[in-house]
Amino acid sequence: MTLVIGIFIPFLAINSGLMIKFSAIFTKRCLSFYSRAGIIAEEAISTIRAAVAFGAQKKLSDHYDSYLSEARKEGFKKSLLVGFTLSIMLFGIYVCDAWSLWFGSKMIKNNELFLGQVISIYSLIITGYFSLTIFFDYIQAISLATGASSKIFEIIDRVPSINIASDTGNKPENVVGHIQFKNINFIYPTRPDVKTLNNISFNVEPGSTVAIVGSSGSGKSTIVSLMLRFYDPLSGDLFLDAENVSYGLIGSIYENLPDNEKRERIVNACKMADAHDFIMNFPDKYETMVGERGILLSGGQKQRIAIARAIIKDPKILLLDEATSALDTQSESIVQNVLDKTSRGRTTIIVAHRLSTIRNATKIIVMNKGVIVESGTHKELMDKRDSYFKLVETQQIQQNLKNREEFNILNSSIIPPKDDFITSFTIKDNDHQFNLTEQKSDIEIGLKLNDHNYTILEFIKKVVIINGLDFFMFSIGCLYPVFAIPFANVIQAFSKTGDILYHETTFWALIILVFAVMIFLVNIIQNVILGIFSEMLTERIRSIHLSLDVTYINVSLIIGWKLTLVYLCCIPLMIGAGRLRIKMASNFQQRTKKAYEYSAQIACEGADNIRTVAALTYENNLWERYHNLLDEPMRQSIKHAFLVSIPFAFANCVIFLVNSLAFWYGSKLLISSEYDLKKIYTIYTAIIVGLLFSGRLFAYAPDIAKAKSASNSIMSLLERVPKIDTWCQDGEKIKTVKGHLKFSNVHFHYPTRLNVPVLRGLNLEVKPGQYTALVGPSGVLLKESSLYDITIKENILLGCLPGQNVTQNDLEKVCQEANIHNFIIGLPNGYDTFIGGKGIQLSGGQKQRITIARALIRNPKILLLDEATSSLDSESEKAVQKALNAAAHGRTTLAIAHRLSTIQHADIMFVIKDGKVYEQGTHQELLELQGIYYMMIQKQHLGESNL
């Protein structure tokens, strides 16, 4: 009989294997769409300022939802598969029930087995099969893990063509710094039809400084990328000290910092990079946390810290790619002097758009479309009056003033802190004046997240309110305990003899088959519904099991309360063990949550800044930080796994201990004729199956703990009411905007740095149609080129107003104005080209021109330009600046710039320093003042004669 019943085991095993295989396939597809959705979400959050500025939240949200929709479709397919296979498993178990009962009755009729033997074999086998239902839940977890791990193992097993972990190759002990490019050709893998470097050859002598200039996309930064071996050349040779290193070195040309680096060396490096002063102004000074991607620092501050990081390594070869591009004039001059001094005695290669930073280079190489068009010193190239001369001419600032050897610079006055800073910002239209005023305390309140610690019941209550109750799910649970009635009748039939035993057993076995078909169909519907409403999966599973346990007890109490009470004595023990396991798992989640969050942040930042990590040979350091953060949670998890298994094992053990007690007591009731065999086995089946399903519930203890931790975060976000709600449609709406702006006594500080005032009583007025420029030291505002992992066309259309109709001609027109149209149509897919996360497949200048096109597409009345041309080469800057000047006509324009040549034709300029307006006037008026603006002009002046 055991062999006959056991024939179902291979069937269940094959079914499980198929489910794991195909479920892993659908899971992998789901994760692929979730990954792309995650990229959009990460980009939108990291560039939230740009998203809000363009009102692109809805468009980005819709794009994010489109990937989720595709993931849901794959998840629905997986739900169908899982529902079908799990239903087949349960169907097989119940068919096995019916088959074993019928076969057992046949063997009793033929006198091959006794009644006691049949019942013993049946009870053991069926208990084993129902125990397998607990394993079904783990099968789903295994299939999910299989799908998720396939991508991970694919990455782990991949051997990159440029393997930084390899121990083979050249290991130069002493680097002199002689670099030679010989007939180098290169094509980016993502753009195989565009030859980036075309037979490039040049020498860099040890200790010399070579500058590489040219238009955007000419191949300047590619040369640096080849030296750092981000890529290998298509052909040609790259020599370092006469050694061919076309395919890389072991380690890097940089030296790693030792672990015991002295603080003095760090401080000295920061002083040389003009970073020490602003660091010391922070409350925690050098221990200040700068936030993810250094978000708490301005662009200039971040760049100065990056320069300090390069200086501290004391490299033999110094590579500078736009090293001062984000600095204001004064800081640029200081840092440039530091770099000039630091580069002495070192081989230095500089890539620059700001030509004022490379005029003292030993040799300047001018590139265009991947080839070298000319080279020489600054004076030699200026005398040629060719490509370099034209680049310099486009950056030349018009002035006719004499040199001054000394400048009297106004010192900033320190304003005493106030209890409440009042911010007033006025916008005027034809009929109304809107005054926007906020108290500091209100802003701080709006930033706080709800930190209430929600319980599981509170979270389920919220889910029920959001999604509504599903009576159908509870009704499913009521089907299982009814199974105890036909089973008990089969046992009762076993007490008969001959044909009566056989016929009654056959009848009730057929009834069980009917139940098997019903459960098969119901489980398919259940799993499909759970797949459609996947976000309700965990809560509904637990609701089903809660309804199951109560129904089993109700059935058994109706049949016989005495024996039921014996079984119920194990319920408190099981509940206590289950709650203990949940509590232990929840505490473990809380202990390790911070470590996992911080380690994930380090991993994400490392991946996001992979070029910087590789250039500084920081891979091992980063890995060690990541590993150390996870080391303690891993040790705790091993200990936790052992401890949490004790209550789980105890809860399952109690079932069998109470089972033996119940059988003993049931025999006494049977002997005393209080209960008959049918009643005893009805109670036995209802309670035992119920307890087995209860065991499944407590198997979810780790998931319940994770759900509790996750629910706190989710509910905090759901309950949070932001102070500035960008989705809100309330408030006054300006019907017609003329563009009259006025700042009146504006004070401001960032919520994360309450003791560092940024604006200190700022007063300025911008009249309608006026082109206004803001200039000043770094730390006022931050420019961003915020692009997303969508097509070029979709990135530009993010700037459209809701309901705005944009034709292809309109799109091409703004791209021509931004001087990017020719580049776009030269791509294989044109405007439908995907540009990767954060526009990674584009150069800095190309990204910035696309963001300019995005700003122009809505034809705005007010145009805000924050370093709009800072990443452009001279030629592109001139063309784009011309377009921006044309676009500014008839619009109120507010421009922030470090490149003063881009704003010299503004109607009025405000010079901001330490949060206050120190000077204002036209370009000529400010020059005549010979103050801060005059000094900044002198430091950016490139011409020879006027100096």
Image (cartoon, rainbow, N blue to C red):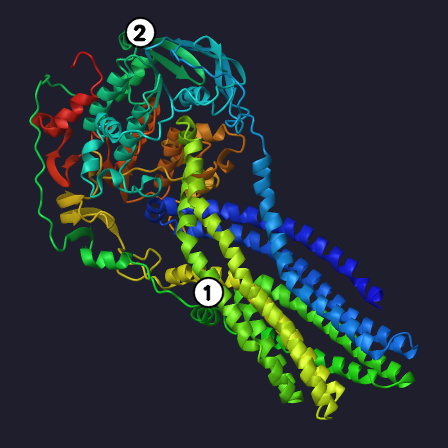
Residue 805 visible in the current orientation: no
> Which residue is at a point 51% across and 36% down the rendered structure image?
833
Check the image and name the residue furthest to the bottom: 673
Q: Which sits earlier in the primary sequence, circle 2 or circle 1?
A: 2
User: What whole-number distance in Å separates the C-alpha atoms at marks 2 and 1?
Assistant: 79 Å
Residue 194 visible in the current orientation: yes
Question: Which quadrant, please, contains the C terminus?
Answer: top left
The x, y position of residue 295, in whole percent, is 31, 42
Query: What kind of element bears circle 2?
Result: helix
> Which residue is at a point 62% across and 53% down the rendered structure image?
142
The x, y position of residue 66, in whole percent, is 52, 51
- Say which mark, if any, is on residue 650: none
Give amino acid for label 2: Lys
The residue that disc 2 covers is 384
**Eye-nearest disc, 2 or 1:** 1
The reply to whether callout 2 and callout 1 are in contact (CB within 8 Å) is no
The quadrant where residue 609 appears: top left
The x, y position of residue 364, in whole percent, is 33, 12
Question: Which quadrant, please, contains the N terminus?
Answer: bottom right
The residue that disc 1 covers is 583
> Which residue is at a point 71% across and 78% down the rendered structure image?
483
The x, y position of residue 172, in whole percent, is 45, 15
Asked if residue 563 lies left or right of residue 343, the reply is right
> Which residue is at a point 53% across and 77% down the rendered structure image?
572
333 over 646 or under it: above or below: above
